[in-house]
Image (cartoon, rainbow, N blue to C red):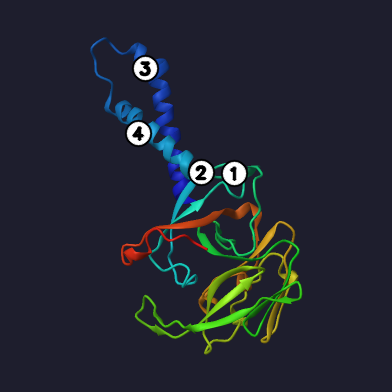
Amino acid sequence: MTFALILFALLVLTGVIWLLDRFLLRAKRPAGVNEPWWVEYAKSFFPVILIVFLLRSFLVEPFKIPSGSMIPTLHVGDFILVNRYTYGLRLPIVNKKFVEINQPQRGDVMVFHYPENPSVDYIKRVIGLPGDKLVYRDKRVWINGEAQTLQRDGDYPYVESELRFVYTERYIENLGGRKHIVLLNPEMPQIHLGNVANFPLHEQCSYTEEEVRCTVPAGHYFMMGDNRDNSRDSRYWGFVPDEMIVGKAFLIWMNFGEMKRVGLSIE
């Protein structure tokens, strides 16, 4: 969000200078006199900034994975591309949708503005759609009364950035026909009740040490990380409203520490 504002400010600044020179300053400049440096720079950078702004606002936006909450689907240091138009075209900065295209689907990996701090972008997987009744119990997801299957797929030990070794169990989760990998840590509780925030529409959820129950409000989505026991997600801070959606993640385009991940599609 901050970068978008800076980019927009630069676009306006260079555009205004270009227009001033085109319709006012150029006519007053004596013949043979070079244009000021600030005019030259503005005219050079304006088309570049305009192209970047349009591409980033309406087509594709880059995003860097900052945490391990989506391991093993996404690793820390992955640079990914986010499709900005698949969920509808939105006005830059204000993020107001003006063209409806598609709605988020269960299982999509989605980037959104973090509800507790909209200046920060988060990435999680869409678990609950508007109107869904969700239960998270025994580290399994129930959607509208139907248990989503988990199939054990070995172990997944990894090392966190603080060089702390973490042991997790790897499972294949089936969300209504869409399969992906999730990690579960048998040593962790399924919910840390003390970390649950007093978020908007909190009354749509109920919490006990055994389970989390939520009914997803209209126009909202319930998000969870694939690294289930190392993810602060909708279980803790609530629902993502439609107006905070950024786009759908679809490709890893770079990871300087793991080059073999370059070019992997995000499922």
Element marked by disc 4: helix
Element marked by disc 2: helix
Write down the residue under mark 2: 57
Could you tell me how far apart the alpha carbons at marks 3 and 2 are, in whole angstroms? 31 Å
Query: Along the line of sight, which residue is nearer the eye, 122 or 15?
Result: 122
Write down the residue under mark 3: 25
Q: Is residue 232 visible?
A: no
- Identified by mark 2, the residue type is Ser
Mark 4 crowd level (few <14, some 14–19, many ≥20, 10 Å Cα) = some
- Identified by mark 4, the residue type is Phe
Rendered residue at 31%/31% (across/down): 41
Asked whether disc 2 touches disc 1, contact meaning CB atoms under 8 Å apart, the reply is: yes
Mark 1 crowd level (few <14, some 14–19, many ≥20, 10 Å Cα) = many
Query: Along the line of sight, which residue is nearer the eye, 165 or 31?
Result: 165
Residue 200, image x, y percentages: 69, 64
Residue 22, image x, y percentages: 40, 18
Counting residues from the start of the chain, the first of labels 2 and 1 encountered is 2
Could you tell me how far apart the alpha carbons at marks 3 and 1 are, in whole angstroms? 35 Å
Counting residues from the start of the chain, the first of labels 3 and 1 encountered is 3
